[in-house]
């Protein structure tokens, strides 16, 4: 297909926020201060499971400088959470605590020292209960129970079958079962959660907060405080990363709101790094067991998949996570029969939630290893085996996901070539290995988290009255990924003006509804809404121009900031230009030349009609299957990726060095190529960290051991090899200008590609992450005893 | 986490700081780079009411050498040590300093702080033990020199009195034909506490093949950084061969006393063996330079 020519899109335009970030002027939540503000602090449980016998706040209240102490008595027992079907949290524990870190009370004081001193004065009497720390313990027959409403410690359960796996396995020539367990991971974003809440005499609440989802925070705050939603305003300042754990209303935000209401003063609260780990809501620990059946010729026939998720004390996103862990294996390979049994259990640890590649990362790591195992068995090149089974554009999976565009074959081919696979596979010296894997991900959840016909994104564009610029107002979440730049570029392209003439104000619930930055949805969904709004503006302005100069709208267009005319009839605007020059007597930079500028046209539109405002909206069409849980995995589009990784394994210490990574990602049209590459690089580094280093650890009492980013090991710059990022551009019919996701899908192949490369280097399959030197060495020794080592 | 309240003192001379430490006693803590101390303060594991900063005291910064050896100011940073040429023997120390933390940490972290913190995994301790270093401890009206091998007591504990200040680290001059090497194993390539570290220093006889003397020191495999005396003694008079190095590795692994906290004791010992072999091999290579 011949590629469309764009003026703004598909370039490497600098980010619209580059200057404020590079110069340190960007304001994050903790940079915001209000006169008379108080500082909040939260009392968290020191024990993992206990009945609360009594809470005495009197001494804390008497401490000079303390302005308010709140507990469940003050804020009530309204249940909240992420999915309304699993509201299982109250803001403060009242009868029982379920993990070390569970919130019990909050304090507002004139300074942070006083607030923290007050916490020490709150006396809580606990009656300790036995604890469960692992999924096995939670599922044991006489296990201590976390929630009365969820017997057996089962937070969610999924049983699905597509096709007939039992019958399909009978037709298979090879059946293989493989297991994998990952470790609880943390988002590892730079900026800990922070917020400042303000409450005024008109019962209006304004919360500036570091969030990925202003909209959901607004709803939760309204529900919890009882303040009408129209009086609750959530504003998102600059955000230093989210990766999932900032996708829900937090106890931090709710405490600040309640304290602001109670005191009438602005209240700021900031999580320490330890509290970020305690709040968690990041990647679950998954125990996967997969049985895959193949024909001799390499055709995948069936997958039977069991998974247990260690969820921590509350549900958070977990109900979606347990579905995603199954549904995301439906593609990108043709898989006619798939059975999935997933279960998410409660344990006395911080709650897990969504993290980049939601639910699918460990599953993908397990499945892609199986493909390599079968390929070896069948003596087929692993890339070839993948290619043979790869879906194509237009295919629909057994669980009803439609691949409206799919550049997977191109991606696979690109990494094969880019890595020089043919020269390396099977030919590397001892201790070196090469491995491949693929992945795919949704480009926006097809349904909102609560049941609703709401638009997923709306946008508003106002044309400045002088005509020179447009102001795009949107609820989108710019969290460092470049969402503001993305919508600015789309607005500029759709309207036909230079990027510099677009100003973006975003992340404010006063501006528009946008569900936020999760499920890799904003480029497609917010992009659509923005495009819609820009087209609306364009139509309004061209209508005025056509009317004024006696033209037909269909013969007019706007490009690069000028009005273009089709056909023979000329735009006779000499008089208007003269007027415009007079209106700006003494000004410089007045429009010249033989084309009417957008600035003049927009000024004209204002003079005729008053302020020009245009709105846009998007919601996905009805998509996907009708079965229970079909909503999770359903998306208007899917991004795909392929990766080849090369490693060196030190066979005497077990230490793995990743030498090279070649990554290709199909993102539809790359709105901004540099930003696409940035997402790919970031995904790979997060995947590499999860594969090799990261693990949130607890002691036998449920106390967090890795409470700092010194103890919790993210990949450093030295651990990252140079990455070859190859952008594959399919044309997504459901995306704005053909664009779709890159934010999460890119992480999918990293872990299995590393695991496959380690196998290639050593002949040993390791089924537990992370691949620490000790784990690798012990696996190699075991392998050597079994006579397997290559 | 907030810092607790304390008074901040910034004496300009060693004398002045000794006076302060004498009057404050154990209510005070010395502050060098602060990369260990500030964490302890924030976690409230240390709660001094006085902090005495050493950064204005030029007498304890930098290094010099004479016939007797090399004298390193305790306030010298890991970055300075990593980037300086400390002579053939000092290279093993530079290698270790270069692997401390990250560039940001190395710019702050001092050698004195590294030793005074007395963590089993302190990276500059093994090379200093292997180099037979001693430390000079100063207090009002008194000064003593303690061999580093007599300095450490247990994790976080060493022989210094509350009022003492470490002013200098002394490395005796090594015979000609010496070479040293440092090996560190961590999970990541930077910002990593050593799982195991090994420093080896060997000196060769004139024939270039026979080992005259060897010193091997181990980090992170015992309550304190330690010397593997038997492994080193076993090499004396032997040829510098892979076989002999392997034997030394085995003995060092036995001498180690890992507590099995971060990795299993079995793995730690295996790594002592491997890293000892590697350190000896590279130390021998270095003797030929
Ligand atoms: C992120 C990070 C990574 C790290 N990585 C490593 C690593 O890879 N390897 C490693 O070995 N260490 C590492 N460390 C620990 C630390 O950086 C080193 O131990 C460092 O050398 C300490 O020196 P300092 O000058 O910062 O000491 P400070 O924190 O200033 O002091 C430490 C202690 O020594 C005492 N002290 C300091 N100077 C003197 C003196 N002259 N006389 C008497 N007492 C004194 C202080 O009172 C205090 O108790 C790391 C630390 C961090 C935060």
Image (cartoon, rainbow, N blue to C red):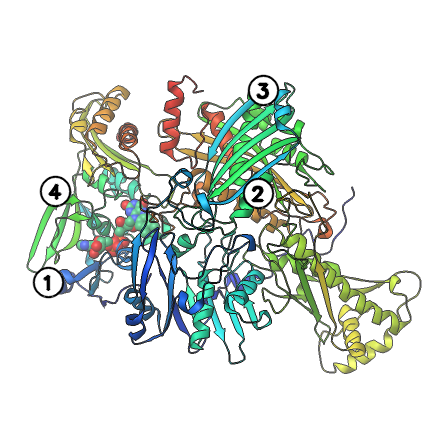
Residue B31: horizontal and vertical position, in percent? 23, 59
Q: Nearer the viewer, residue A146 or A747?
A: A146
Rendering quarter of residue B99 = top left
Q: Nearer the viewer, residue A571 or A114?
A: A114
- What whole-number distance in Å separates the C-alpha atoms at marks 2 and 3? 27 Å
Circle number at residue A174: 3
User: Mark 2 belongs to which subunit?
Assistant: A
The chain under label 1 reads: B
Q: Residue at x 54, y 23 (%)?
A: A176
Work out whether residue A325 can be spotted: yes
In space, the residues marked 4 and 1 are separated at their CA atoms by 24 Å
The residue identified by callout 1 is: B22
Q: Are marks 2 and 1 on the same chain?
A: no
Q: For marks 2 and 1, give the one nearer the viewer.
A: 2
Tell me if label 3 and label 4 are in contact, CB under 8 Å: no
Marked residue chain, label 3:
A
Q: CA distance from mark 4 to mark 2?
A: 59 Å
Q: Which residue is mark 2?
A: A324
């Amino acid at each position: 297909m011949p590629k469309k020519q764009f003026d703004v899109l598909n370039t490497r335009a600098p980010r619209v926020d580059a200057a404020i970030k590079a110069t340190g002027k960007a304001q994050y939540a903790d940079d915001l201060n209000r006169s008379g503000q108080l500082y909040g602090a939260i009392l968290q449980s020191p024990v993992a499971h206990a009945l609360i016998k009594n809470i005495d706040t009197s001494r804390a209240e008497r401490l000079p400088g303390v302005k308010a102490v709140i507990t469940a008595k003050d804020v009530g027992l309204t249940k909240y959470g992420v999915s309304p079907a699993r509201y299982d949290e109250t803001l403060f524990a009242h009868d029982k605590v379920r993990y070390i870190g569970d919130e019990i009370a909050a304090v507002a004081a004139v300074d942070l020292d006083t607030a923290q001193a007050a916490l020490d004065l709150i006396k809580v009497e606990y009656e300790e209960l036995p604890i469960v720390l692992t999924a096995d313990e939670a599922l044991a027959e006489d296990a201590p129970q976390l929630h009365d409403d969820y017997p057996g410690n089962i937070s969610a359960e999924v049983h699905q079958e597509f096709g007939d796996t039992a019958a399909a396995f009978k037709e298979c020539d090879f059946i293989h079962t493989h297991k994998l367990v990952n470790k609880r991971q943390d988002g590892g974003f730079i900026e800990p959660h922070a917020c400042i809440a303000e409450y005024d005499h008109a019962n209006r609440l304004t919360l500036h907060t570091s969030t990925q989802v202003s909209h959901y925070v607004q709803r939760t705050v309204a529900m919890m405080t009882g303040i009408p939603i129209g009086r609750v305003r959530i504003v998102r300042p600059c955000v230093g990363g989210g990766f999932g754990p900032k996708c829900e209303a937090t106890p931090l935000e709710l405490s600040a709101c309640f304290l602001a209401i109670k005191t009438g003063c602005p209240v700021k609260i900031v999580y320490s790094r330890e509290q970020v780990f305690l709040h968690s809501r990041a990647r679950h620990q998954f125990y996967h067991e997969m049985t895959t059946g193949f024909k001799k010729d390499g055709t995948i026939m069936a997958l039977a998949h069991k998974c247990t998720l260690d969820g921590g004390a509350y549900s958070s996103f977990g109900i979606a996570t347990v579905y995603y862990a199954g549904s995301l294996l439906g593609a990108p390979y043709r898989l006619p029969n798939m059975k999935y049994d997933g279960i998410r259990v409660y344990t006395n640890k911080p709650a897990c939630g969504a993290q980049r590649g939601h639910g699918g990362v460990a599953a993908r790591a397990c499945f892609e290893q199986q493909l390599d195992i079968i390929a070896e068995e069948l003596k087929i090149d692993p890339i070839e085996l993948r290619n043979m089974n790869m879906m194509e554009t237009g295919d629909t999976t057994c669980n009803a996901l439609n691949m409206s565009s799919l550049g997977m074959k191109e991606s696979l081919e690109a990494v094969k070539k880019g890595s020089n696979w043919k020269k390396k596979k099977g030919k590397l010296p001892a201790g070196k290995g090469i491995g491949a894997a693929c992945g795919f991900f949704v480009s926006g959840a097809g349904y909102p988290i609560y049941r609703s016909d709401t638009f997923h994104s709306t946008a508003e564009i106002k044309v400045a009255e002088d005509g020179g610029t447009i102001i795009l107002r949107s609820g989108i979440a710019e969290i460092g990924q470049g969402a503001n730049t993305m919508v600015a570029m789309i607005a500029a392209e759709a309207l036909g003006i230079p990027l510099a003439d677009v100003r973006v104000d975003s992340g404010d619930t006063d501006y528009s509804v946008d569900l936020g930055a999760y499920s890799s949805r904003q480029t497609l969904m917010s992009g659509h809404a923005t495009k819609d709004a820009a087209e609306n503006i364009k139509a309004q302005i061209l209508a005025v121009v056509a009317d004024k100069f006696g033209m037909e709208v269909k013969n007019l267009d706007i490009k690069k900031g000028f009005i273009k005319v089709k056909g023979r009839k000329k735009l006779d605007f000499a008089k208007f230009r003269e007027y415009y020059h007079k209106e700006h007597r003494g000004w410089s930079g007045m429009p010249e030349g033989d084309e009417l500028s957008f600035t003049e046209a927009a000024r004209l539109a204002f003079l005729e009609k008053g302020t020009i405002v245009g709105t846009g909206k998007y919601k996905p069409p009805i998509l996907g299957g009708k079965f229970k849980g079909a909503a999770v995995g359903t998306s208007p589009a899917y991004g795909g990726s392929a990766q080849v990784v090369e490693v060196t394994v030190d066979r005497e210490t077990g230490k793995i060095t990743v030498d090279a990574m070649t990554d290709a990602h199909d993102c539809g049209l790359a709105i901004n190529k540099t930003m696409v590459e940035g997402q790919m690089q970031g995904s790979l580094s997060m995947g590499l960290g999860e594969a090799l280093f990261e693990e949130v650890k607890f002691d036998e009492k449920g106390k967090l051991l890795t409470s700092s980013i010194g103890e919790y090991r993210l990949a450093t710059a030295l651990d990252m090899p140079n990455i070859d990022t190859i952008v594959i551009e399919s044309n997504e019919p459901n995306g704005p200008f053909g664009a779709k996701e890159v934010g999460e899908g890119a992480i999918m192949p990293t872990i299995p590609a590393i695991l496959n490369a380690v196998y290639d280097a050593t002949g040993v399959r390791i089924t537990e992450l992370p691949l620490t030197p000790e784990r690798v060495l012990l696996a190699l020794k075991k392998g050597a005893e079994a006579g397997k080592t290559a | 986490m907030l810092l607790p309240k304390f008074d901040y003192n910034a004496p300009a001379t060693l004398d002045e700081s000794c006076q302060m430490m004498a009057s404050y006693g154990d209510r005070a803590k010395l502050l060098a780079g602060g990369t260990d101390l500030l964490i302890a303060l924030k976690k409230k594991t240390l709660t001094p009411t006085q902090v005495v900063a050493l950064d204005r005291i030029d007498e304890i910064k930098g290094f010099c050498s004479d016939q007797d050896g090399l004298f390193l100011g305790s306030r010298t940073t890991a970055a300075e040590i990593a980037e300086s040429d400390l002579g053939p023997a000092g290279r093993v120390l530079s290698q270790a300093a270069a692997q401390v933390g990250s560039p940001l940490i190395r710019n702050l972290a001092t050698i004195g702080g590294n030793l005074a913190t007395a963590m089993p995994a302190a990276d500059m301790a093994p090379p200093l033990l292997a180099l037979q270093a001693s430390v000079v401890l100063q207090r009002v009206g008194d000064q003593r020199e303690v061999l580093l091998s007599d300095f450490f007591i247990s994790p976080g504990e060493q022989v210094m009195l509350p009022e003492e200040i470490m002013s200098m680290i002394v490395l005796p001059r090594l015979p000609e034909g010496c070479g040293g090497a440092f090996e560190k194993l961590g999970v990541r390539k930077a910002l990593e506490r050593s799982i195991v570290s090994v420093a080896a220093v060997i000196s060769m006889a004139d024939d270039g093949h026979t080992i005259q003397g060897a010193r091997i020191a181990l980090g992170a495999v015992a309550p304190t950084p330690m010397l593997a005396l038997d492994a080193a003694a076993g090499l004396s008079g032997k040829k510098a061969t892979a076989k002999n190095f392997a034997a030394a590795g085995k003995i060092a692994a036995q001498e180690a006393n890992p507590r099995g906290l971060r990795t299993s004791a079995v793995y730690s010992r295996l790594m002592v063996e491997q890293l000892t072999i590697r350190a000896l091999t590279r130390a021998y290579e270095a003797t030929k330079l």
